[in-house]
Each structure stands twice: as structure tokens, then as C-alpha cells.
Image (cartoon, rainbow, N blue to C red):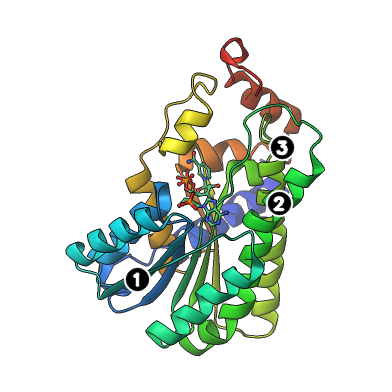
Amino acid sequence: MGRLQKILIPFLGLVLAFGFYSSRENFKPEMLRGKRVIVTGAGTGIGEQMAYHLARMGAHVLVTARTEAKLQKVVEQCLQLGAASARYVSGSMEDTAFAEHVVKEAQNLLGGLDMLILNHIGKSYFGYFDGDVGHVQRLLQINFLSYVAMTASALPMLKDSGGSIVVVSSMAGKVGFPLTVPYSATKFALDGFFSSLRQEFSMQSVNVSITLCILGFINTEAAVKATADVILMSPAPKEECALEIIKGGALRQREVYYRYASTKIPLLLRDWAADLLDYLIRKHYNMENFKNN
Ligand SMILES: NC(=O)c1ccc[n+]([C@@H]2O[C@H](COP(=O)([O-])OP(=O)(O)OC[C@H]3O[C@@H](n4cnc5c(N)ncnc54)[C@H](OP(=O)(O)O)[C@@H]3O)[C@@H](O)[C@H]2O)c1
């Protein structure tokens, strides 16, 4: 064995062991008891499940989406599950003023904020890019700019509480995915903004954590319906996914990968074998079942 290898192998072992053990603080549901949390896009899907987990943990939950009837049901269910309090604000994230209003409501109703979970997405299409620039702009507003607006408004409260920002993203925000071009663009934007902001927080000693969540295919009604029979993967359960996001936020992790094996592991190829990763992604699409719409 060469001298370089003799030094390099133990060194790499040490780095890996340090990385593994330094991030092993255990999650306890009590970490969320009494915490004031906003969950966006909580009328359905993963956001709804996050609201229920937080309620069971005894958090104060403020949920938001457009459809009031769904939010009312989520709030009722949260109260039954043991939330310290549960409220909703309905409206569209297409409007920056609404995004800021939700944060103000947290200030008025809860007197502060410990965790901001940014999860909502606007409706997009599952098909080849159709050249509609207006749609990309609208989606950027909902999926990206409203996240920025809520973060900017919530920052004073989060600084006071030493709180957390949790950003729900996707594999499609780390590597190119076909048939979701506008959606992928908005998710890549989140990585650029929040990863850069994390760097600045570190330089300025701002005690607010940022957790970016990289999700694979999850069994929400919207995702399963949109991709029906085209994506050749079985989706992971939204309940477990929601819990993993909350755990990552509570532990102030830099990133959450769910499920780990189908997200983090393939992404290891990204910088070394990008064409191979692109090919493997395309192999999971059954285009015989695809109808462009
Ligand atoms: N499911 C997956 O396979 C998957 C994979 C990777 C990443 N993710 C990410 O996980 C998150 C949740 O996904 P999901 O599958 O749970 O989605 P979902 O079930 O479609 O939920 C989206 C939520 O956003 C709300 N919403 C839609 N348009 C809105 C608007 N204009 N303003 C405000 N709220 C709006 C919806 O309620 P209203 O319609 O009532 O407004 C709903 O509560 C997203 O960030 C998504 O990118 C999901």
C-alpha cells in the first residue's frame, strides 16, 4: 500500500465517523411540545400529515392553503389529536401580501414563531415543456417567491426564538427530471436561495436553522394521480415522510433525504456520472403510458 493510501484511508474513515456520530442527536416528540409552528400547503398531502404529527406532539399549529373547508377539517382533527392550539388562514400564495399576512397572523395569534414549514406548491402539468413562460412565472411566485416573502417576514420572530425554517423540496430540485420542467426550476431555486442564506446565517451567527428536504416519490393523491402509470416506482407513505421532515427540522439538520436509499444514494452519482444518473431516471418512466396534456 502506498504512503498516500495509508494516510488517506484512515483519514476518510475518521471524517465519515465524525459526520455520522455528530448528527446522531435523538429526536423526541417533546421537542415540539408548546412550539409555535406554521405549516403551509396543509389542506392535503404531506402538509396535512405534518399538521397531525405536530398536533400529537402538542404544538401550536397554524395551517394554511386556499381551500377553507379542508383547513377547517384539518384544524378540527388537530384539536382532537392534542394540539396546544390549532388555527387556519386561507388564501393563495400567488399573492405576496397573503404570504406576509400568514406570518403576521402567527405574531397576532401565537405571539411568535418557532418553526416555519414551507411546503405548498401550485398546480403544474406533468408533460413536456409547453413554452408557456407565464406559467413558469406564476409557479415561481407560488413555489419560490412566496417562500422568500414568508421567510423575510418571519425572520425577526425566528431570530427571537432561535427557531427553524423547513423547506420542502424534491429530488427534482437537485437533478433534472423530465415532464416537470417548471416545477423542477422552482425547486432548484429553493436550494440556491436557502443554501446561500444558511451560509450567511453562519457568517452572521444567526441562530436560525434551515433544513432543506429532498423527497422522492410520495403517495399523496395529487402526485399519484398526476404521474399515473408513468413513473415506475412505488411511492413512499406520506405519514412517515411528514414525520421525517419534522424530525429533521427539530434536529436542525441541514438536509433531509426521504427515502434515503432512493434519494441520497442516486444523488452521489450526480457530480461524477451525471449522464448515468440522467439515464437511470429516464429508465423509471414508462412513456408508453404517457399522454401529453
Ligand atoms: N408527493 C410527492 O411525490 C412529492 C415528491 C417530492 C416533493 N414533494 C413536495 O412535497 C410538498 C407537498 O406535496 P404534496 O404531494 O403533499 O402536495 P399536495 O397534496 O398537492 O398539497 C399541496 C398543498 O398546497 C396547497 N396549494 C395549492 N396551490 C396553492 C396556492 N396557490 N396557494 C396556497 N396553497 C396552495 C394545496 O391546497 P389548496 O389547493 O386548497 O390551496 C395543498 O394543501 C411539495 O412541496 C412538493 O413539491 C412531493
Q: Which residue is mark 2?
A: 138
Could you say where residue 46 lies in the image, as x and y percent from the top left?
41, 49
Pick whichever of labels 2 and 3 is earlier in the sequence: 2
- Tell me the tag on residue 51: none
Can you tell which quarter of the image residue 152 is in?
bottom right
Query: How far separated are the C-alphas under marks 2 and 3?
Result: 14 Å
**Quick check: can you spot residue 243?**
no
Q: Which residue is mark 1?
A: 87
Label 2 CB-ligand 1 distance < 8 A: no
Q: Which residue is mark 3?
A: 181
Q: Nearer the viewer, residue 235 or 86?
A: 86
- The kind of residue on which mark 2 rests is Arg
Could you say where residue 71 lies in the image, as x and y percent from the top left?
36, 58
Mark 1 crowdedness (10 Å alpha carbons): few <14, some 14-19, many ≥20: many
- Circle 3 SS class: helix
- The kind of residue on which mark 3 rests is Val
Q: Residue at x 64, y 59 (%)?
A: 94
